[in-house]
Image (tube, helix red, strand yellow):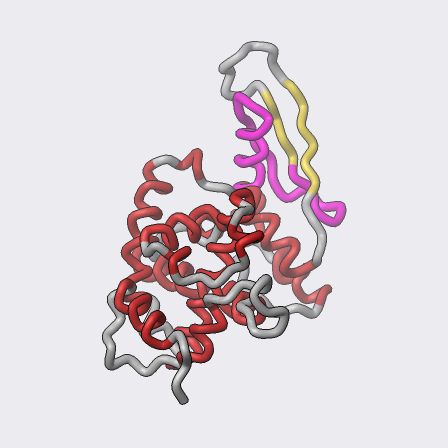
Amino acid sequence: MYYPREKHLKSFVAKLSITQKAVIKWNLLDLALTHSTISSTHNYEKLEFIGDAVVRLVAAELLFENYPNCPVGEYAAIRSILVSDRSLAHIANKYEWSRYLLVSKSAAGDKAGEESRLADSFEAVLAALYLSTNNSDLIRPWLDGHFEKLIVQIRSDPARQNYKAALQEWTQGYCKTLPNYKVQEASKIHGDRGRFIAEVWFQGKKLGVGKGPSIKAAEQVAAKSALDFLQESEIGNILKEEKGVEKDYI
């Protein structure tokens, strides 16, 4: 079947350096590049749902292959940045994504929502490519390079690693609830590395403690401590069993 936008879509695929011989489900790619303001039924929303899992899988595979000795908590923290709207929209802009995304004039004028639209469509395109071959063969050849560059930047600056987001992803994924942080000021000296002490609690259990020169820094250290604890102890498995959920967030 011929799709009206097939020529335009082939131009888009070429930007991703995907061979013209690749078997692609053009109807899905068309959906992945159509915003809901164009059609309430023919849009990328369902593919975005699948693409969210695909991009996490690709990021996890890349981290496991290239950094086999990293703690799982660090995997989760780095991945949270890789798959963030900001990161995905940044990659999308490198391919002039907006030229191929169908969106109404009113929505296009909403610059505040542009990052979210690009990231959502990006995930949807990954889903379309994944479903075309039932693997990531059409994705990793062009996406890995972007992720690898970002991983190097993140690992060279550990302060960028968002352990709070990674821990939140875990608790929401398994138990649909968020951890709580309790912070105390232990010193009045600005710049003191132990000025603030943070504890992270979840379901009545203290999972980690961290110190830092700011509240944010202390909470990040506490979250990292919690992720390491969950990985090394049985409590993570206990919490998962209590909820009867089998997921792979840590």
Viewer-proximal residue among 155 and 234: 155
Q: Report the magenta residues as a range.
A: 200-224
Whether residue 100 is visible here, answered yes or no, is: yes
User: Does residue 111 sit above or below 157 in this rendering?
Assistant: below
Viewer-proximal residue among 167 and 53: 53
Viewer-proximal residue among 130 and 4: 4
On the image, the x and y values in percent for residue 109 come to 53, 47
Q: Residue at x 58, y 54 (%)?
A: 233
Q: Residue at x 53, y 35 (%)?
A: 221
User: Does residue 26 sit above or below 108 in this rendering?
Assistant: below
On the image, the x and y values in percent for residue 92 come to 38, 54
Viewer-proximal residue among 173 and 53: 53
Q: Residue at x 62, y 62 (%)?
A: 237
Q: Count the marks: how many?
A: 0
Residue extending furthest toward the right: 204
- Residue 207 on the magenta segment: yes
